[in-house]
Amino acid sequence: MDTGYDFITPEFLNILFFTQKNLVIYPYVDVKHIHSLDCFTVGHDLIDIDSTGLENLHDIVEFEINNSYSQQPTLYYLLNVNMEDIEKLLESPNIRCIINASDNVEHLANGNKFIFYNKKSNSFLNYQPERENLSFEEHLIQTSQNEEVLLDEILKIKSTATKIYSDVNANTNSDNLPALLSDYDQEYWDKILFFTMQYFNVEIPKFTRPKTILKKKSLASLKDFSYEYEFILKTNRKIGQKFIQLLHDYRFDKVNPANLEIDQLYYPKKLYNYLRNRHWAKGIPQDFITNWVQKLRTNSQLDENDRLDFQIIFDKLQIIPVQKFHVIQEIQPVKEPIEDIIEINNTTSERIVEAIPPIENFQEFKNWLLKKLDELQSLI
């Protein structure tokens, strides 16, 4: 079953936006889901053409390209395209398009202007992601809590590229480029500059890059908790998105913005590192964890797999499972002896976090997994 999330990946962001290549997807993908790629087409007017019943698709597209009065280029969604039309479109020098075909067209994959993607096997034919540096793309997607935020980030990059293009045309030197790129880490500058060159068809002059100066705060013995943040996001997308949302809510309610750097205001991973060093030195607080789970349990958003993923996250980060605290909170209103409640709290606080067996020892891992499922089932 196709979903929009299938296309929100670093690879498609790299292909369509940063390198400005065309895409051929086969077999058929419904229109709604293929349009999830829209956020990677920033800087283009979008036109859909369904080729069903058309005998001259190539001529129609060529006419549109040559007679467009738009101030920005057009990207075409060409749907239900047959093999013969794809062969002709591959020869069009100025086209920007996303083609969807029902036929198996893998034998047409040649060169790298049109990237072929087999949706059925989730694999590229003439593009090797492992040979690409996708760190910026991964950063953008991981730090965006939803597609709207991701689109804002891409629009910001497009705006930066436009400023660079205007500056290059207006000045004989490149002195302003470091300032125009200053919102981004230097490791990402080349990716933004390459996009600028591809989109505007302009050469970027060489310039001297400033040496990275560590801020005093960075010189302190601050720990890097990025691995915790990344583990949460990689384990479960739904849980991770809610985690990012609650991080920003916590910042808004509990943190003085004057104490934050600009990037800590907008990049969740950097905000998380700030909180872990300054506010959560002993770990993520229990009230945050409780709120995290409760928000996801609203409207039955948590299924069995999500509960298991929560348990994996708790074990990895050595967090006492929040479900235990729900049990305590449910017991407290009942008129029971105070000693009993204290005993439960002590038992809970002394619980040793169980390590996850390595998957290489499959039988042990399987037994652990079944045990956790039984525990979760008993709490529902």
Image (cartoon, rainbow, N blue to C red):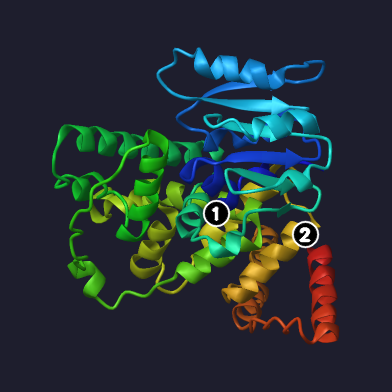
| Disc assigned to residue 375 | none
Give the spatial CA distance, label 1 vs label 2. Answer: 17 Å
Q: Identify the residue under disc 2.
A: 305
Which is nearer the eye, 364 or 374?
364
Instruction: Please indicate, yes or no, whether residue 338 appears anywhere in the rendered image.
Output: no
Judging from the image, what secondary structure is the residue with disc 1 in?
helix
Which is nearer the eye, 93 or 100?
93
Q: Are marks 1 and 2 in contact (CB under 8 Å)?
A: no
Q: Identify the residue under disc 1.
A: 243
Image position of 91 (left or right of 371): left
x and y percentages locating residue 376 in the rendered image: 79, 66
The amino acid beneath tag 2 is Asn
x and y percentages locating residue 263 in the rendered image: 32, 52
At 78% from the left and 30% from the top, the residue drawn is: 84
| Quadrant containing the N terminus in the rendered view | top right
Judging from the image, what secondary structure is the residue with disc 2 in?
helix
Image position of 60 (left or right of 181): right
At 82% from the left and 15% from the top, the residue drawn is: 53
